[in-house]
Amino acid sequence: MSILVNRDTRILIQNIGNFGEFHAKLTQGFGGAPVVAATKIGKGGTKIADVPVFETVEEAVRETGATASGVFVPAFAAADAIMEAADAGIKVIVVVTEGIPALDMVRAKEFAKSKGARIIGPNSPGVVVPEECRIGIAPVDIYRKGTVGVISRSGTLTYVGVNQVTELGHGQSTVIGIGGDPVPGTTFVDLLRLFEDDPETEGIMLIGEIGGSAEEEAAAFISEHVTKPVCAFIAGATAPPGKRMGHAGAVILRGKGTAASKIQAFEDTGKVAVAKLPSQIGETMITALRKKK
């Protein structure tokens, strides 16, 4: 049983335009959890990618039993879409949308929490459980069932690390992109706690980047609470201060949130193997697993 989703999950695509339709088809071809419903204003009663389309999430949940959603709604309306999903009973809300205004995201996060829903994202590439479930925009051909749990702020580096682990003959338990926006619905610490308690996960790969304090908080949690091998990589070591690096949350302010400070925090735990280059992420993870065994 995965920590968030599994093959029994029933997936809803919110705002199934061309982009959402493309990824709905990839998810259907991935196997495991099906896409059972979609929403699109003005398209209720039709089908897109052989998926029934509804005007509202409430109607989609009532008619199809959807339990998780992928949000492909533009940033100006995404917070409302998140709250609509939570209010309708969706329990895992994967938000692909990036650039949601911070105050909107704070409001949506609090509302979802009050409804017992978990937000992954925004600006998330998605959640993947190999052979069981795919929600979001991640590629479909790099995964292998295994025991490495992955948490990442970077979509591209998620794929890099996952592909390296697969090519080394290992696999993944659950892969989660928490997104690079300033207000994440779920944090490194939230997921470290779940992976530590997950019997299917033997090691944890954590991919962070400059900006904010999430990685330092993760290091503190690992130091006190995590017993499983952890590999970490921090992107943005060469980014100039004050410049954003791709993500809205990846900006160094007043000397805080630097790659050096994050790397030091992980090294100070005495528990985390830190990869120095992207090309070393998979190898570092597998070496840490072998040492533990």
Image: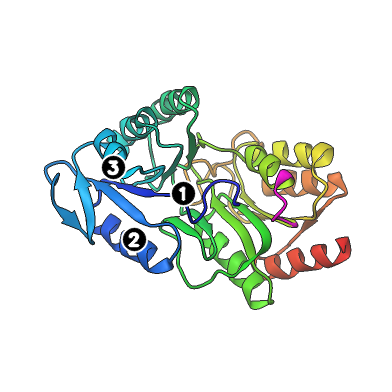
Q: Residue at x 57, y 56 (%)?
A: 175
**266, 190: nearer the viewer:** 190
Q: Residue at x 68, y 60 (%)?
A: 148
Q: Which residues are magenta?
A: 197-202
- Ranked by sequence position, the earlier of labels 3 and 1 is 3
Q: Which residue is mark 3?
A: 74
Proximity of marks 2 and 3: CB atoms separated by less than 8 Å: no
Q: Position of residue 229 (x, y in %)?
A: 80, 55
Magenta-colored segment: predominant secondary structure:
loop
Task: Identify residue type, mark 2.
Answer: His
Please state which of the two labelled residues, at mark 2 or mark 1, is closer to the viewer.
Answer: 2
- Judging from the image, the colouring scheme is rainbow
Q: Is 93 drawn above or below residue 202 in the view shown?
A: above
Image quadrant in which you'd find residue 233: bottom right
Proximity of marks 2 and 1: CB atoms separated by less than 8 Å: no
Q: Is 113 drawn above or below residue 173 in the view shown?
A: above
Quadrant of the snapshot with the C terminus: bottom right
Image quadrant in which you'd find residue 60: top left
Q: Which residue is mark 1?
A: 124
Q: Position of residue 193 (x, y in %)?
A: 70, 40
Tally of numbered discs: 3
**Secondary structure under badge 3?**
loop
Task: Identify residue type, mark 3.
Answer: Pro
Report, in whole angstroms, how far the alpha carbon at label 3 lies from the one at label 1. Answer: 14 Å
Task: Identify residue type, mark 1.
Answer: Ser
**Secondary structure under badge 2?**
helix
- Ranked by sequence position, the earlier of labels 2 and 3 is 2
Q: Which residue is mark 2?
A: 23
Crowdedness near tag 2: few (<14), some (14–19) or many (≥20) residues, C-alpha within 10 Å: many
Report, in whole angstroms, how far the alpha carbon at label 2 lies from the one at label 3. Answer: 16 Å
Q: Position of residue 160 (x, y in %)?
A: 58, 67
Q: Is residue 130 left or right of residue 233?
A: left
